[in-house]
Every structure is written in structure tokens, then in C-alpha cells.
Amino acid sequence: MRKTMLLIVCVATGGAVQGPADEPATGVWPPERLGRQPSVEAGRWGTKWENDYGHRVEHFALTPEELDKVIHKIVDGHPRLLLRPHAWKGGLSADQFQKRVREEPWARSFERTAASVRQDVDAAIQNKTPLRWHDAHQAALYYLATGDESVIPPLVDFVLAAEPAYNCGGGLMTTCQVYDWICNSPTLSDGQKGKMRDHIAATALKCAAVQESGHAFAMFHHRGACGWMADTLVAGLVLHGEHPEAEKLLSWGAGYFVKNYFRGWQRLGGRWSDYYVGSKQMPMAIACWASAVEQPDVYEVIRRDYGDWLQGHMYFLMAARLPSKTFSAPTAGFLHSQRHPLSSPANYMLISRGYKNPDGYAYLRWMGVEPKTGDELSVLLYDEETDGKRAWFDENPAFTHLWGRDGNGYVQMRSKGWAPDSTVVEFRCGDYFWSHALNCNNNSFYIYHKGHLALQSGVYDDYYRGDHGAHYYPRTVASNSMLIFQPGEFWWRKEPQPAYGGQRLPYLGGSTDFSFDEYLSRLDAEKHFEMGEITAFEHAPDHTWSYVCGNATDAYNNPKHCDAAEGRQNRPKIDLFTRSLVYLPGSNNLIVFDRVNALDASYRKAWLLHSVGEPHVDGRMIGAEVRGHIEDYDGDTVKITWEGGVIPPPDPGDPGRLFVRTFLPRRHTIRKIGGEGYEFWAGGKNRPVVRYDECLAKGTFHPIEAGRWRIEVSPAEPARFDNFLHLIHICDTKVESMPRAEMVQADGGKMIGVAVGGWVVMFGSKGRVEGEVSYRTPDAGTEHLVVDLPPGTHFTVTGVANGPRVMTSTKEGTLRFTAAGGAAVAIKPME
């Protein structure tokens, strides 16, 4: 019997920082994780295509007994990829498909497809050239619908011409679908069928060999995403019962998926870490698996045993689109052009069909794509039952979601879903995956409201060879995070380079994680891929507040690990950097609270925020390195309006605006850097974009909002430990001033917070707070959110509305209550 093999990844999460308020703050390292030893010998960097990579795909092969648990019964006969010979709950049968193409609105679309196919086939026969992938795919579907035998010869040639797609794989899935859809043709001889099967099997074996080569790089990156092993798997599915290599290909492909991809994507929560190739290939590979295997249902297996990552992936792809239908840099990955879709319409339909989830259909319509009258695949994939359900997406709900808490850690918070005036706040803190994916931006945030307001700066440029691509874009200085400047700190790029305050960069190019276990083994080994941890995440059921805390201490050179190269060793510079965000969508306020402990008081700290428009500081200028470009101010409040960018807001006459107020450090300096010739300033010079500079021109076909200005908030008095407390009010140009707000401090300084917009939000000044906490509320009645308390602890809370209450902190260490105006609030642990 073939049932699902259950693989459980046990991961411990780090706790909040502890310590009395009068003691020096120190970092608390995340506890040891489970499963960090690699299952096979770690791979070595190989020569492209040629040298052995150190792994074999048979290391992950399933035994016959294991394979029987994962793939119990494969569909008899053909077609079995995306549809079946007979009716089934997951899609169409061949007869249903043939009937649908003759019905409206499908008939008109199919007539256009048929005309295109006949033209492509005639050209291929006349010119004696093979059909292209897309043309062959269309032609095979056309044959499936019509039985027109004239298209069979060029489709046979197409199958026999298949070779591995050496960039990132996945091409053999199309070849297998073509074979599957035409193999019932009465004009095909047994010899032709045998040659096609032999060629598919031989090509699949080559794909597995490419996966073993040095070109595979990392399983989380587009060149190791899933393409070659998807080719291997789907070849095994389509050849099952028909070719002697089928069982081996199934064993290799299914084994690699369940032992690596399923566990890896579960760790990411379905968020794809970089580029768009994996986002395009994985749903199709799973859909081929689901249609070819009668038992068990792989969609249900993923939902039940692997954290429902496939639906999580669809929601991440949807969340990647901002209300303006553009991307933010953290979601789009490297080359974050607005013209590169993260996935195809077919993939939203595949996932929606697999789970009977209408949100994929609603999203496509929001994007202007009609699922019922789309390309030739939509006639095959559309599901009337799913489309008839009520879609959550259409309601433009406020929401907060965390992808990959134990992976690369990405949180998104929205005030009104995908509505034009919705606010989107993003936060990232997690493991290293691949440098294209902006991995030096742990504990960074991104804000969109009627334009890209607080953004990730820079452009993936010149493949890291030039100044911008190496010294700015992948570095912390380009993010909304924190710099800690240590004299002599370096990173390595052929020779030592000044680090100018940022986080470690394990690789300038890519890492070589061939397997999920190897990735786990590197978290606390070699270059230490553990760089950040989401230590707390919670939101109100109605999303009236959202809270996340990240610990990015590991991202910097620290007592646990310091980067070294060529005999040189960096020194630790911090042992603590945590960042907490609380978003209050009702008043559109974002509170950012940081704890930073440098190991030397002389190391300057700089709180970063990047923008398109020029920041305007309310204080007086107290110094200028370059007047108009690098200036220091003694003010508290900064006003930033979207202006001058290359991606205009939905209504250019009504752009977004930020007000940023610094409460802590009490004495601080605000440095403003930017303007023409200083947009990408780092290490004492500008790092201009060279290779992709056309992306920064207005009206360009591939626009990238890279930023032109930034502010750096630094303490005016040197100290090892500092709290940073900022209130960011998100609004538009109709708002001319910051809302009234004040800092609230608990007795003894244990907790610090902000009162604004009818809320009081309190944070532990140095981490988790033990013992009693007391503070006085503002004059008006307020809602209170207190974080950094011991989880699951019973408290007596006085000063709240309707008298004292016994309350229990949540598993994330929060309390939520209402207090009267001017009340003395006391939170006392119960014995």
C-alpha cells in the first residue's frame, strides 16, 4: 500500500532577551535546533556541468516500501497529466475537456488556438524545424480536443528532440505532457512510442545528472528550485508501467521532493525566497503529481503534513502585489522589475483547483485576467465549482501573515487588503538563503501607501562585479535596518573590503545547499546561515493590531561567529539587536522599537530609513559634510512624501506621505543623505547603477523604485546599549502634521512605549520583563498592548476599565486591555 510518508521537522524558536533593567543588556542566542547534521557528506563546489558535486540523487531515493507509501496508485492509461481518462474530483476527464472546447465562452478562444496551431504545425513541417515548447504544448492540447492526426508527426519530433533545460530545468515536464496527450493516437506505431519513451527516460536521467552538477547551486534558488527533479519525477509518472527506468525515476524524483522540497517549502511557509522560476515550476510539478496519482491526494498530504505550504505559496504570490499592482523589492526578489510576473495565471488556477479555493480566481480578475476566457490552459484548468464560491480576497480584508517563521522570516501587514488606499507594511528577519534575495536586510521594514514610501534601495546590478552590485545593493546600508560601525571591519571580495557598518554577507554570489539537511547543517557551521529569528508574532483576530519581533544579532559579527577569509578574522561588534514592530491600521501608525548592544561604546549606531522623496527634518542643521546632500540635524520629526520616483502611485495627484518621530535615543542626530550623485552613498562614495541604469529612468519598460534618499538616526552620546523608539505615521498629502503622541515610561524604566491614536503600546526596554510593571496612562481612555511579558503567565492587572482583572499573557508574551484615562496601570504576576 502506498500511503504518505510523514516527515516532521522539529524546530525550536528563540526567546526574547531577558535581564533586569539595571543590568547591562546581553544577547541570548537562539537554542540549538534539531536535525542539523547532514544526511550525506556536504557537497563541494564543482565545475559547471562537469565535476561531481559531491551528492547523488539516489541518496534521496525512496525504497520500494517508502515509494509505495508516497505514491500508492498511478492512473492507468493516458492522459494522466493535468487530466485523466475518466471523471475525477480534481479536474476534467478527456471527454469533459473535448466537450468544453465546443462550448462558449471557450469555443471562441479555442478557435483562435486551433488556427495558431495549424499555422505553427505547417511551418514546422515545411521548414523541417522542431516546434517550440509553447507551440508544441498548444498543438498537443489541440490534438487532445480534436483528434486531428495531422499534428502528430511534428509532435513526435518535438518529443524526440527534448534535452535538459540547462538554465534551471523544468522543460521536460512540457515534453512529458505532450507525450501523454498524444500517445493514444492510432497513427502512432509501437516503434514511435518506444522511441519517445526511451528518449524521455534518457533525458530524465540527464536532468538528474545536471541536478548533481555544480550548476545546481542551492535548492532554494532558481537554479536548484525544483526544475530538474520535477523533470525526473514527471518522467517517472508518465512512463509508469511502460518503461523499465520509470520506477527509478519515480523513486529519485518523489524522494527528492518529500525529503527536500516539501520540507524546505514548509520551512518557508510557501514564500519563495528569490526570483520567479521556482514560483512558476513548483505548482505545475505538484499538479502533474496530483493528476497522475490516484492515491494519496498530494494536495491533502501537503496541507496535512507539511504546513499547507502550497496554499501559503499562492497567498504569498498574491501578497507580493501591492495595491498599485506593483511589487516591493523584498517580494519580487533580485531584478525586482515590475514587468517580471512571479508566476503564471495557470499556477493560480492549479492551486485554486487543487484546494477548491476561489481566491486565486479573484486575484486573477483583480489583475485583469479572466480565468474563464484566458489562454489555452484555462480551458483545461478552470473549475466552475471553485469559481462559484465566495472569495475572501474580494472583501479587501485587513490582514497580517507570517511566512517562514523558522526560515527566512517574512511578515506582511495590510490595512485594507488590495484596495487602492491600503497600507502595506513588510518586515523580514530570518536565515540566509541566497544573496540575490537581499539577505543583509534582517530586521528591515518596507512601507507602501499610495506609493513606495520606505523602501529597500538599490538594484541587482552587473552581477556583483561593479560598485553598486557589490558595495551597495546587497549590503545593510541599502535597507531599513541598523548599521553599527566598527573600525577595521571587512568583508571579502577577492580582497578585503570595508564593511561600513552592516550585517555579514555569507556569500557575495550563491551558496551550495544541495539538500535540505545540508542547509540545516550550515545554520551553525561554516559561514553560519542562521542570521535572524522571528521571536514573537501575533495579531488581533480582527487585525486591529499586529506585532512582530525579530532578533538579528546573528546577522552581525558577534561573539558566536565572526566572518573570516584568507587568514583574516573580524572581531565581534554587537551581542544584541532586536526589533519590534506594532502596526495599528485604524490610525495607520507603525511603532518601531529597537534594542542594540554594541561591544564598544565608540561604535556608532545608525537607524536607517530609505525613501524616494527628500526627507524634511523639523530641527536645525548642525553640520554638513556636503551641503544639500549629507547634512546633520538636531530635530525629532521627519516628513517624507513620495515624489520623483519612477513608479508613480495609482493617483499621482494624491501620493503617500510619512511622518517619522524619534523618541529614543533622547539625544540624537538625524543625518540626511541623498540627492543627485549621492543616491547610493556608502563607504565615502556614491555607488551608481551601471548595468541596469535604464530601470531608474522615468517611463522605462522595466521600472525599479530604488530610492534616492535616506535618513540615519544616531545617538548623540556614545553608549554600548541604546533603545531606539520611532513612531511612523502613514498618511497622504492631505495630512500636514504628525498626530499627537507621547512616550510612556514604566516605573524603574522596565518598559517604554508610545501613546498615540487611542492606544498605548509598551515594550520591555531590555527584553522580557520579569516582576511587576506600573505606569500611568494618558488623560483619555486608551486601548493597551503590552508585549515582552513572560508567556502564559497569570497577572493581576489594575487600572483597567471595570476594575482589576486576572489576565494571562499569550504564548507570545502579550496582554491586551482597556484602561481609563489617567489611570495608574499595574501588571503584577500572580504567585
Image (spheres, rainbow, N blue to C red):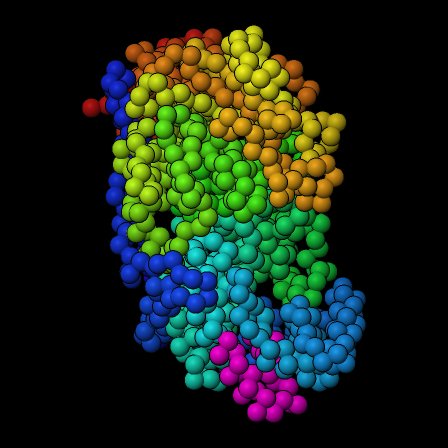
Residue 772 is left or right of residue 585, and the answer is left
Residue 189 on the magenta span: yes
Seen at 40% across and 61% down, the residue is 46
Image vertical order of residue 370 relative to residue 24, above or below: below
Quarter of the picture holding the C terminus = top left
Residue most toward the bottom? 190
Front one among 90 and 787: 787
Front one among 26 and 496: 496
Quarter of the picture holding the N terminus = bottom left
Front one among 73 and 734: 734
Instruction: Residue 587: give x, y in percent of width and height.
Output: 56, 23
Seen at 47% across and 80% down, the residue is 240
Image vertical order of residue 472 relative to residue 379, above or below: above
Seen at 32% across and 13% down, the residue is 749
Stretch in magenta: 176-203
Image vertical order of residue 185 relative to residue 136, above or below: below
Residue 812 is left or right of residue 658, and the answer is left
Q: Quadrant of residue 675?
A: top right
- Provide the major secondary structure of the magenta segment: helix
Seen at 58% across and 11% down, the residue is 618
Instruction: Residue 89: give x, y in percent of width and height.
Output: 54, 68
Is residue 377 at all visible to an observer of this figure? yes
Is residue 104 at all visible to an observer of this figure? no
Q: Quadrant of residue 371?
A: bottom right
Residue 315 is left or right of residue 111, and the answer is left
Front one among 592 and 464: 464
Q: Quadrant of residue 560?
A: top left
Residue 126 on the magenta span: no
Total count of labels: 0
